[in-house]
Amino acid sequence: SGVCHSVPVSEIISVREEEEENGSRQRDDGSWKKIREREGKDCRQAFTVLYVERCRQHRWRCAEVTFTCSDEAFLLLLLLLFVSTASRPKHLLVYINPYGGKRQGKRIYEQKVAPLFTQAGISTSVIVTEYANHARDHLKMEAELKKFDGVVCVGGDGMFSEIIHGLIWRTQIDCGVDPNSPEEALSPCSLRIGIIPAGSTDCICFASVGTNDPVTSALHIIVGDSQPLDVCSVHHNNMFLRYSVSLLGYGFYGDVLSDSERKRWMGPARYDFSGLKMFLTHHYYEGTVSYLPAKGIIGTPRDATRCRSGQICLFSFVFHPESSGEWRTIRGKFLAINAASMSCACPRSPKGLSPAAHLADGTTDLILVRKCSRFNFLRHLLRHTSKDDQFDLTFIEVHRVRRFRFMPRHCQSDSDLELDLHENSKRQIFSQICKDHPACGCAPAYSSWNCDGEILTHTGIDVRVHGQLIKLFARGIEELPVFEDLSNPCAI
């Protein structure tokens, strides 16, 4: 056709031979037969290349082009393809959540993802989960992980959380590490994790790929991309609570989650309703935050540099012993205490809660929102979508840290740290009218922690960042010019 197709060999999905029958080309059944097209003395080969084509808004699609060439060129292509596929998965363990989001997980996998895996020659073992934490428990106890090159979850952020909890816990037990000790350095997981977005929120997928598109995610898995990701461990005393990869939120975001959990019948609209309700109640909480600043890194939470593909964090993860740092302490009244281990970007907030946070630099951005008026708090919330510097407000503090602890003011003993969620929920009423609620006792003494969309059962916590503990089948968000130059979409 005279059209030049140029793509990296690493982004070729598969090569399929074409068969000639009665002068017309027929697609081969994938069995790699030796089909020849004789033109005089030349022996020529017809084959179709399936490759990655970039579309707008960070989406990938599978495209194809058919070539005719000599046997030697064909064999050279196969050799290059073989070399480039060394890091690609061949056997995957797939967990599908059939209940998450709009209950479309099974359909999305079967119609959009499974055919691509088949074309790429990837075998799968599929488990459709039947109850909460099914995937986590299976990974912890039963899965024969040595048989697989990666684990794939089809669902939302809750499903991804199940996967990392099972996989990280299993890795620590196999390596002889005590997950309950907050002082232990955790062992990195060897298996990569793929995310096929099919939930009501897909924050991790959006922040690591740039879009919540299942086909794009499937293609990143097929080409064998690898993106390290930091993980925070959350402990109370010497007891492990949860792992977090995106947001830990106390105060506003914890209250929103607690309230929305009682309104699940509303569907995704419950988040908007609970958010408005908690904004109007305007609760604040007293406590002490201690943190260990991240030293020896480049960049701050307020710089303009974003985490982008190919930089595996430009401010690359370098280990600095915690003992070399000096703990700092802040006491006060807070509307919100947030720790963002990634930008927490999503379609509603394209820049996220902390736009300059990085996926794999071994830190988290600690954001403290002190007591302020409703109007000022609204200014803070609106800046998630409208301003370059979201922290340029007098009542906001932000610190890049490797570890932090929180203790609510009114705790008198360890037993007070455990939340009575039932009593707490009865006190979080919509009738907040007084100016200083602790004086009149009309508001709860404690909030709850929102840990990646799950409520923690303790308020006093110790959070430690474990740099690059897991790896995703992703490559980070690519720069927009790669996608916007679509006059020649195949820069191969």
Image: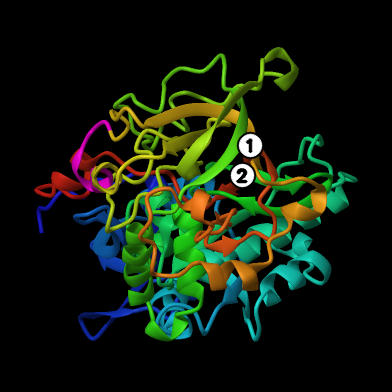
* Screen quadrant of the C terminus: top left
Q: Which residues are magenta?
A: 381-389
Residue 387 included in the magenta stretch of the image:
yes
Amino acid carrying label 1: it is Val
Task: Answer left or right for 48 relative to 197.
Answer: left
| Residue 2: x %, y % from top left | 9, 53
Residue 193 included in the magenta stretch of the image:
no
Q: Are marks 2 and 1 in contact (CB under 8 Å)?
A: yes
State the residue at coordinates (50%, 78%). 262
Q: Is residue 384 visible?
A: yes
Residue 423 sits in quarter: bottom right
Q: Which residue is labeled 1 in the image?
A: 465
* Screen quadrant of the N terminus: bottom left
Q: Which residue is labeled 2 in the image?
A: 231
Does label 2 or label 1 sit earlier along the sequence?
2
| Residue 474: x %, y % from top left | 46, 50
Helix, strand or loop under label 1: strand
| Residue 23: x %, y % from top left | 20, 81
